[in-house]
Amino acid sequence: MTDLGEAFISWILEQPLPGEATHGRSDGPIAATVSIRTDRATGTVNVYDLGQSTPDIVEFRIVRAGYEDDPAFHLHFELLDLARAQELFGEMLDVFVRLEHPEPTKVLLCCSGGLTTTMFADALTRTAKSFHQDYVFEAKGLERAIAEGDEGYACVMLAPQVGYQRAEAAAAFPGIPVFEVPAKTFGTYDALGAFRLVMDALERVFEEDDTSEDKIAIEPILDLARASNVLVILLGHFSRETRIAWRLYERDGVTKSGHVVKCTVDYRDVEELIAGLACDEVDVRELDAIGISVPGIVEGGVATLPWAHKQEYDLAAAIRERFGVPAFVENDANAACVGCYVSQDEYADVSLLVQHAGHLVGGAGTIVGGRLVKGRRGYAGEIKAIQQFYGLPTDEEEVRWSPEAMLKIAAAHVVAVSSLVAPEACFIAMEMVPDMEALRSEVERHMPSAYVPELIQVTHERERTFLGTFVLALMGMEE
């Protein structure tokens, strides 16, 4: 272990820690380990000595008791700067503090009363458990729920038949999300779709089942895919945490994958993830390219995120300089649009709209004649201005939790993009707009029905984003 690794371990052992810290050393790849235990969670700090005069790799991991396969905090990074390592360790301790409240997250489902809602609440609780999420869903009539008041709920879901009382319910439960479940989601007992709404409302994510639409066909994309090793990274930021998911695409498809979970967003996290892949036996020197998708505007390789540690950063150049591997960065909505495009062969001109429940603004991507429309300085697809200019709902509470407002936003995008480029198909990734027939009816109020594009619901946007980012990296290599 390097002198810097020794200094870091010594520093950790001097810090006041929750629970009891134990320090153990072992021969082999793990040179030193610090364990931090409480009754509710276990954390480990591993320092890997890679030898050959290379920097140590540090791994942080926190798991909740009973949820060992779903880390609450997890990252690798190359130990180059002691101050940076100490900063990240502080984030790790912040997560321990958050985990000191082990009670399950309670969600209230309200209706006018009836057995159906109780059964739906039970289905939601089972769905949450299947994703290792500690949620409990309770069903009550709205009148009773308002009379009893707040009982520690994280959010309130309204069945469609009481959706018109959302304002009254929001007043009774101030400070937490109150939203209506779309009629199609409720009417078809779509517990997974409803659970996604809750996760978005609380601005958290879970890792989707990779078998759902897994590896959507590398075969039909490009022959180059069969001869390339490409690392694909997706960065997602939420109010409570940042998740950076990665997959290694090799000649036989996806061979390895993983994700980072932390509190803040910083472009250095992406670089540190790449450096830390040595722990997963990924040799970065053997990669042909790295593809990255991020929220926000991307111009060239420069990403702009208003809430990042550094708002503008040439991420592609930084990765090329540090690792010697070509890197390609793209907006996540554009990448998802490319993923939708290459997973079908019926339409040449397509557009995608992404806006998750609980989010005031979404993003869009458009492909015309097989080419992604980027526009001046990468601004194409930034749809916030459309929402404001055309007088669409802008009240935060109305937009974030209203299926009707989300439907109008989706229709406005379809009408606007149809007027400009007339795509053959519009892909809609909006949990609050699951009914494409209802969307078509709204669009037909503003344009002739003969010109309305095919409307296609996207239920696995993350898979599309992975695929699109992979394809964009391959295209960058070709160019």
Image: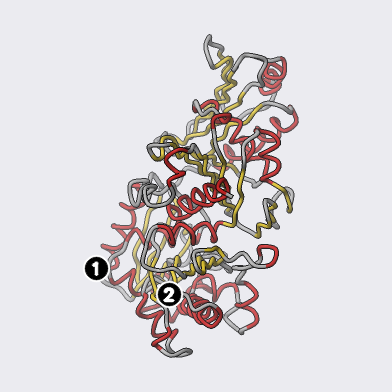
Image mark for residue 210: none
Please tell me whether residue 194 is drawn above or below residue 16 in the rendered image: below
Residue 168 visible: no
Mark 1 — residue? 115
As rendered, which of 393 and 350 lies closer to the eye?
Answer: 350
**Separation of marks 1 and 2 at Cα, in angstroms:** 43 Å
Q: Residue at x 67, y 23 (%)?
A: 12
| Helix, strand or loop status at disc 2 | loop
Q: Nearer the viewer, residue 251 or 189?
A: 251
Pointers 1 and 2 in contact (C-beta within 8 Å)? no
| Amino acid at pointer 1 | Leu
The residue beneath circle 2 is 424
Q: What crowding class fits label 1: few (fewer than 14 Cα within 10 Å), some (14-19), or many (20 or more)?
A: few
Residue at point 54% right, 17% down? 30
Q: Residue at x 46, y 79 (%)?
A: 404
Q: Which numbered disc flags the more N-terminal residue, 1 or 2?
A: 1
